[in-house]
Amino acid sequence: MKFSAQASEPLVVFLLLIAAGLLAFYSYVYRREARQHHQITRRQLVMLWSLRILAGLRAEGREPPLILWALLTDLRGLSRVANRAERERSLDAVLRAENIWTSRQAPLRAELRRLSRADIDSLLVAAAAADRMAKGSLGGDAWVALEAIVARIAGLRLAA
């Protein structure tokens, strides 16, 4: 049996509709659970929001290397600030020297308080591995690796 590109178009559209429906269903369930229990913490809410954004990017057809580039840019900046903050007295001076925008300083300070230097380094290594997966030089699913990285940044370690 031969398949043509024209015959597979309706199938692709159908599969995309199913994926969008599943995404909407899962986000509805997460929100409902959060409202019902009122036990969800701010960190858990940030994690769910972050994973939802990642799922949306995947559903839109964005490629992992582009997402990883943005993520690595911020992680490298966080790493540079953490390195300099260990040597210098004033975090304000470090942020000015690294040209961190004022609007980005509060989230960066929060992450510096929460993440150790070893955590930042392991996130950089995991992001590099995910980048190699996305480019095909390392086996594995880049989207699963991206989800794990985003969850770790949000404060949750996923099971292997």
Image: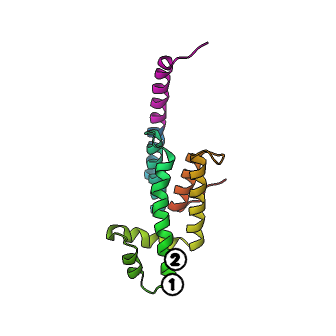
In the picture, measured across the screen, residue 145 lies left or right of residue 160, that is left
Residues tagged 1 and 2 counted as in contact (Cβ below 8 A): yes
To which quarter of the image does residue 103 belong?
bottom left
| Residue at screen point 49% across, 64% down | 75
In the image, residue 155 lies in the stretch drawn in magenta? no
Q: Observer-nearest residue: 29 or 35? A: 29
- Part of the protein shown in magenta: 1-22
| Residue at screen point 37% across, 72% down | 99
Q: With respect to residue 61, does 31 lie above or below?
A: below
| The N terminus lies in quadrant | top right
In the image, residue 6 lies in the stretch drawn in magenta? yes
Residue neighbourhood size for the residue with mark 2, other residues' Cα within 10 Å, grouped as few (<14), some (14–19), many (≥20): few
- Which three-letter amino acid code belongs to the residue tagged 2? Asn
Q: With respect to residue 36, does 60 lie above or below?
A: above
Q: CA distance from mark 1 to mark 2?
A: 7 Å
Q: Main secondary structure of the magenta part?
A: helix
Q: Observer-nearest residue: 11 or 44? A: 11
- Say how many tags the image has: 2
Residue indicated by mark 2: 83
- Which three-letter amino acid code belongs to the residue tagged 1? Arg
- Residue 37 visible in the current orientation: no
In the picture, measured across the screen, residue 1 lies left or right of residue 64, that is right
| Residue at screen point 60% across, 58% down | 126
Query: What SS does tag 2 mark?
Result: helix
Q: Residue furthest left?
A: 102
Residue indicated by mark 1: 87
Residue 135: percent from left, percent from top: 57, 46
